[in-house]
Structure formats: C-alpha cells, structure tokens
Image: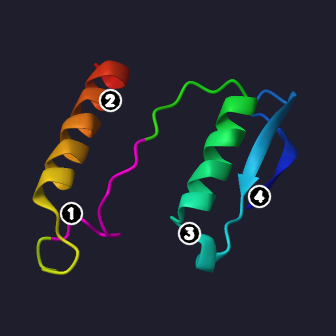
Amino acid sequence: MGSKIQFKRPDGSSCAGYLSAPNRDDWCTPAAADGLEATLKACGANYELYRYDANHGFCNDRSAVNYDAASCNLAFERLQLFLTKHLG
C-alpha cells in the first residue's frame, strides 16, 4: 500500500513520512482502510476515519445505484464539523 520514507523539509532538516502508493485494485477496500488506519495509529497521528455502509460514490445523486442520501448527509455533516474544528 505504501512505504515509510525520509524527506527534506523546506528548512533543510530531515523528516519521516509515509508515501502512499495504493494499487488501484485495492483502493477503498476494507483491507486498504484497515491498512491506512493501522499506519495512522502506528504514527500516532491525530485523525478521523469513518466507514459508511454504502457503495463507493454514495454522494453521487446522479447514480441511483450508488446514491445513499443518509450516508451522504452524515458525511457532509462530519466534514463540516472537521473543517470547523481544524480551520475555525
């Protein structure tokens, strides 16, 4: 899914990071989300990860197969709360 890397910061110092390189076949699968969450936890990252019981593209109201209004509304509420919390 990715690898740990070292990179140069603008101030010239070195910093550890994670380079995500997902296989398109694995993108957005439960296993990929599990791997991402494990990496975030291992790094001590402050993050929020939500999973929705809906098809990929569940906010696409032009797709009757994928659109899930309840999940879409909840996702937008969470996004708004996240942005307000972190950006003011």
The residue pinned by badge 1 equals: 59
> What type is the residue that disc 1 sits on?
Cys
Q: CA distance from mark 4 to mark 3?
A: 12 Å
Q: CA distance from mark 4 to mark 2?
A: 26 Å
Query: Where is residue 31, by image quadrant?
Result: bottom right
Say whether residue 59 is magenta: yes
> What type is the residue that disc 2 sits on?
Phe
Q: CA distance from mark 4 to mark 1?
A: 27 Å
Q: CA distance from mark 1 to mark 2?
A: 18 Å
Which residue is at 16% across, 63% downward?
Answer: 68
- Magenta portion: prevailing SS class: loop
Measured as percent of width and height from the top left, residue 45 is found at: 63, 27
Lower position in the chain sequence, tag 4 or tag 3: 4
Lower position in the chain sequence, tag 3 or tag 2: 3
The residue pinned by badge 3 equals: 27
Lower position in the chain sequence, tag 4 or tag 2: 4
How busy is the neighbourhood of tag 1: few (under 14 within 10 Å), some, or many (20 plus)? some
Asked if labels 3 and 4 touch by Cβ distance under 8 angstroms, the answer is: no
How busy is the neighbourhood of tag 2: few (under 14 within 10 Å), some, or many (20 plus)? few
Callout 4: SS? strand
Say whether residue 37 is magenta: no
Lower position in the chain sequence, tag 3 or tag 1: 3
The residue pinned by badge 4 equals: 2
How busy is the neighbourhood of tag 4: few (under 14 within 10 Å), some, or many (20 plus)? few
The residue pinned by badge 2 equals: 82
> Which is more foreground, mark 3 or mark 2?
3
Q: CA distance from mark 3 to mark 1?
A: 17 Å
